[in-house]
Image (tube, rainbow, N blue to C red):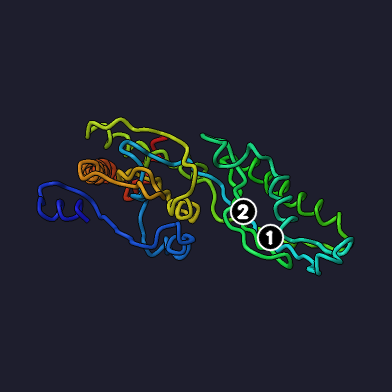
């Protein structure tokens, strides 16, 4: 909004059409991104301003799935439980410890994927667990989901009747596969960062962003920094100085895009994206 205010206050700073969209962040289940109408938005490319320290320029995120387990036990009086009781609480803990213990968020970094037990509740009779399955590489991601499914089958084979039911579904995918087909969106951002005296920092995002869902809908949408630090914790913060730098980058991208578009329009090309394709 500050960037838009600056453009309104300074009409001498030229830019093309700028379209804005606001929605709930992806931590709420990416509901806004899933409902985002790319055709109605009618843009060649876009950017999310979704956190990260100064310099962050992200187009490489996790492939993500969620696994929901329901573990059914048999609760009887402990005095007569021999060969009868099935303690769903114990089955749940045994399942969690059968997963690779070094492949959890607290033991991984960079491009390393993981299994993450995020929620658990229940009693001897029934336990519900939720796991996140994450990996940057699509093939490794598929392998992780197969492994998880096989573990469920292996546990069920220990009982006379299946005790664990699994619901497994994909949440989002790595936007890198899409962004690499549209290098202009990264080139423009890099030029903007450098024109503002900021060194771009490329790191794999160990999470997701609305942009990854929107990118897979056909609108390439990498993520720019907004300056937040220590995200998702009680020590999260952002500085005014970094937010001002974020505004400068947004404005620089808009101005450079306008200048590039004008050059291509002189060549009789109306779409910036098509112009870049023609130049390759």
Inter-mark Cα distance, 2 to 1: 8 Å
Q: Residue at x 55, y 42 (%)?
A: 105
Q: Is residue 78 left or right of residue 262?
A: right
Label 1 near label 2: C-beta < 8 Å? yes
The disc at residue 97 is: none
Q: Residue at x 15, y 52 (%)?
A: 7
Camera sees residue 144: yes
The N terminus lies in quadrant = bottom left
Residue at the disc numbered 2: 131
Of mark 2 and mark 1, the one earlier in the sequence is 1
* Image location of residue 231, percent across then percent down: 39, 47
* Image location of residue 212, percent across then percent down: 47, 50
Closest to the observer, 10 or 42: 10
Q: Is residue 229 left or right of residue 136?
A: left
Q: Residue at x 59, y 40 (%)?
A: 113
Residue at the disc numbered 1: 69
Picture quadrant of residue 108:
top right
SS of the residue under disc 2: strand
């Amino acid at each position: 909004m500050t960037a838009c205010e600056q453009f309104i206050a300074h009409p001498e700073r030229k830019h093309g059409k700028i379209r804005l969209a606001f929605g709930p962040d992806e931590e709420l289940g990416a509901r806004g991104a899933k409902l985002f109408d790319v055709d109605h938005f009618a843009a060649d490319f876009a950017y999310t301003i979704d956190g990260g320290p100064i310099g962050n320029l992200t187009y490489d995120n996790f492939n993500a799935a969620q696994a929901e387990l329901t573990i059914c036990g048999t609760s009887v009086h402990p005095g007569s439980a021999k060969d009868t009781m099935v303690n769903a609480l114990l089955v749940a803990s045994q399942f969690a410890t059968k997963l690779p213990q070094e492949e959890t968020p607290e033991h991984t970094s960079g491009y390393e994927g993981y299994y993450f037990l995020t929620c658990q509740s229940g009693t001897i009779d029934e336990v519900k667990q939720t796991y996140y399955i994450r990996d940057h590489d699509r093939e490794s991601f598929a392998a992780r989901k197969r492994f998880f499914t096989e573990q469920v089958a292996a546990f069920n084979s220990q009982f006379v009747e299946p005790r664990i039911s699994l619901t497994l579904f994909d949440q989002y995918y790595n936007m890198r596969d899409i962004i690499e087909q549209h290098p202009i969106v990264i080139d423009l951002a890099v030029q903007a960062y450098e024109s503002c005296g900021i060194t771009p920092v490329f790191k794999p995002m160990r999470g997701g962003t609305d942009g990854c869902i929107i990118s897979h809908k056909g609108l390439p949408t990498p993520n720019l920094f907004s300056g937040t630090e220590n995200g998702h914790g009680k020590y999260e913060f952002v500085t005014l100085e970094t937010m001002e730098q974020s505004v400068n980058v947004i404005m620089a991208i808009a101005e450079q895009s306008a200048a590039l578009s004008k050059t291509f329009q002189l060549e009789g090309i109306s779409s910036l994206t098509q112009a870049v394709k023609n130049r390759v």
